[in-house]
Image (cartoon, helix red, strand yellow):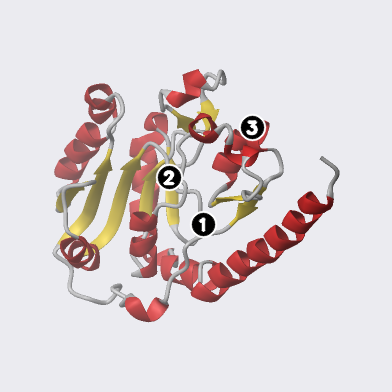
Amino acid sequence: LYSSPLEASRLFDDPRNVFFLQTCDWAEAMFRPWFGERQQRWFGGYDMSDFQDARTLPKTWDVLVYDKIYLDRDTLYQQTIEPFLKKLDQLGLTYTVIRYGAYHQKDYMEKVRASRSTAFFAHSETQGMAYQECLATNVPIFAWDEGIWPHPSAIELGIGSAPCASVPCFDARCGTRFKIADMMESWDAFHANLDKFEPRRFIAEEMTLQKSAEAYLRAYRETAEAGAKLKRAPA
């Protein structure tokens, strides 16, 4: 897994390397000037039997706040999570905060099941299994998605600010995307329609183990075919 194509700019100098797997549109687009069409799409799938439908379970919190802000944290935390928590306090809503890299999976899933919704604060994701585990559990997502990749590598690539997504696999069944500028009004609409979202259905229909396996096998077959053509091509 590479954060930037510059980490593997000579990947295809080795003739054994035919394709590179990508899990989302925005990463594939960012790598295209370097990797061209030598990319294949794949994602990690989910066995729904591993995830209990938590919608009707007893709830401890109205909101699970997932904090994955690590770039320019002092500024962005003050613009996102800090005012969001103040709004929850003003509304009298209960919440718990979990920070990326500082929890055990078992504790995380217990909090997911005990929450009515999740507010997901991340700069970007290429798949985002943490938020997708919420969706599989039938917990809707309120997702900060500014749409710009703030990673220092963007400057090294000479592209300034690259388009990205914090929830790359997501549709209207899953919840609501928002930007800093419209966070407060977006929350009001999201919270008012909480019971109308169907996040578990999204995972069950779009991100199954079967579809994941089919995507991998398709990439595997095309790798074999493309590799054979490369071997036959004149030096």
- Please rate how many residues cluster around mark 2, counting C-alpha atoms within 10 Å: few if below 14, some from 14 to 19, many from 20: many
Q: Which mark is residue 172?
A: 1
Residue where numbered disc 2 is placed:
125
Amino acid type, callout 2: Glu
Q: Quadrant of the C terminus?
A: top right
Between 72 and 221, the one lying in front of the other is 221
Q: Is residue 158 above or below residue 224?
A: above
Residue type, mark 1 in image: Ala
Q: Residue at x 15, y 52 (%)?
A: 96
User: Under tag 2, what secondary structure?
Assistant: loop
Marks 1/2 in contact by CB < 8 Å: the verdict is no
Residue 172, x across and y down, in percent: 51, 57
In the rendered image, residue 99, in percent from the top left (x then y), is placed at: 20, 45
| Left or right of residue 3, residue 54 in this image | left
Three-letter code for the amino acid on which mark 3 is drawn: Trp
- From this viewpoint, is residue 192 visible? no
Residue 131: x and y in percent read 36, 55
Question: Separation of disc 1 and disc 3 at Cα?
Answer: 33 Å
The residue depicted at 24 percent of the width and 36 percent of the height is 81
- Give the mark toward the camera: 1 or 2: 2
Circle 2 or circle 3, nearest the eye: 3
Query: What residue occupies the far bottom of the structure in this picture?
Result: 49
Q: Which mark is residue 34?
A: 3
Towards the viewer: 235 or 204: 235
Pointer 1 or 3: first along the chain = 3
